[in-house]
Image: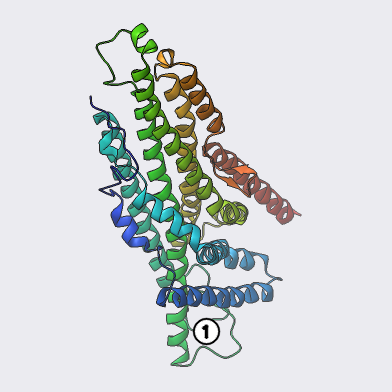
Amino acid sequence: MVIKFPKPGEFILRDDHMASMRKFLKLHDFDGKTKYFWIGVISLEILLLVSRVTVIFQCLDRPRRVVDLSATIPITITALLKAIYLYFDKNRVKYLYNTIESEFWDFRICGPEVQKQAITRYKYSSLVLWSVVTNVIICYLLLQIFPMTPMQSESDRLLPKVVWSPIDLNPSPLHEIAFVIILLNGLLTALTNIIYDYFYVYCAQHLVVQLMILQDLLRNITEDVMVDLSDVEKFNSEDFQDTVMDRMKICAENHSKLLKYGENLGRFCSLVLVPQLALTYAGLVVSGFILATDGSSFYQDVMYFSLFLNTLVELSIFAIPSSHMNTQSLLMLDAIYDSKWYLFNSRMKRACTFMMMNGQEGISVKAGGITKIDNSLLVDMMQKVFSAITLMTALIDANQTK
């Protein structure tokens, strides 16, 4: 096996196996027409969110209708926050995009095992993401055709969502115009969530592969260097030590770059994840409670189950890649230990020690810099959701028996 240690500018990522996702996102430019598009999306989201919240306040005397009207509000709020953050953090978005394109290594520099793992990761990540996109779009279209919440009165003409308006929206063409605007808003809400979440996944998967490449280079850092010499001769050879030290410098610089990239990726979603955790919890509790207490309509049960599942998937999209990044970044310590360090002189051993100290905390994504987003959080979240649903159901049953 031949391992190639790249110098600056060499072996830059040649084939982006998630290029279709990159083209779908198109987040590298927020200037010109794109700027006004995002401002328009944010303005429309705010307008209709206020309108829907107004309807909820008008129905406070009917708790069950409030629950029904609130079921999709968390998704709308998270979409609005993500749209705002995507636009105002556009410089970080450009950095994350450009680093992949101009600085990340191509996995062809590694052995066949790592190349196979990288291709498999890209393949299945893209497959899962496109499957989720398809499911979200189908559920969205069904929600527009068959809304889960009835209108205020039987005389009102059907709209995709119940909204408040200072004017009567029943006459034509006001009804048709309102229908199209609400329909467009719903589509933009779904796409904004998808775009933000999948941009994170796109960056995270590339980072995981880069960490795998670096691990492979570290484990084979002495590969093909004076293979005819014994271990003792290698240890005493200045040429051997200088050659390996040059390789170690390349690996150390790349490791620092990947840690910086992971830190920026964590900051990119740190603030957004704070409200998303709370809204995800609220959304799961509301939709789960409706499923547990209302069996009047098979269609509504299917849609609320789909809403419950999509809300959980949205959090999983952050938690699972975050766990992978943390695991792979910590495996870097094992890779350094497996790099035949016993052949290194004191200068090389110090370099290894500094590299291990630099990466001992690993890369992790935290909501607000406090709550770690990983697989264990999903388990804790579901336990709390089911506990809340059980408590709410028991309280309602107790009130009904009085």
Q: Is residue 306 visible in the rendered structure shown here?
A: no
Residue at the limit of the structure toward the bottom, as seen here: 172
How many numbered marks have been drawn onto this rendered protein structure?
Answer: 1
Which image quarter: residue 177? Answer: bottom left
Residue 78 at x, y percent in the picture: 55, 61
Residue 61, percent from left and from top? 71, 71
Q: Please indicate, yes or no, whether residue 335 appears anywhere in the rendered image.
A: yes
Residue found 41% across the figure and 77% down from its top = 33
- Helix, strand or loop status at disc 1: loop
Q: Give the residue drawn at x 40%, y 13%.
A: 343
Where is the C terminus found, in terms of image quarters?
bottom right
Q: How is the image coloured?
A: rainbow
Q: Quadrant of residue 241?
A: top left
What is the three-letter code of the residue carrying label 1? Asp
How far across and down, in percent of the image, does residue 306 sit? Answer: 45, 55
Quarter of the figure that contains the N terminus: top left
Along the viewing direction, whichever of 211 and 163 lies nearer the viewer: 211
Q: Residue at x 43, y 92 (%)?
A: 173
Crowd class of label 1 (few under 14; some 14 to 19; many from 20; radius 10 Å): some
Of residue 136 and residue 112, the one placed in the foreground of this image is: 112
The answer to whether residue 328 is left or right of residue 274 is left
Q: Which residue is rendered at x = 32% and y = 46% of the image?
A: 9
Identify the residue position indicated by label 1 in the image.
156
Pick the front one: 106 or 188: 106
- Point out residue 261 in the picture as x, y percentages from the top left corner: 47, 46
Q: Residue furthest right?
A: 402
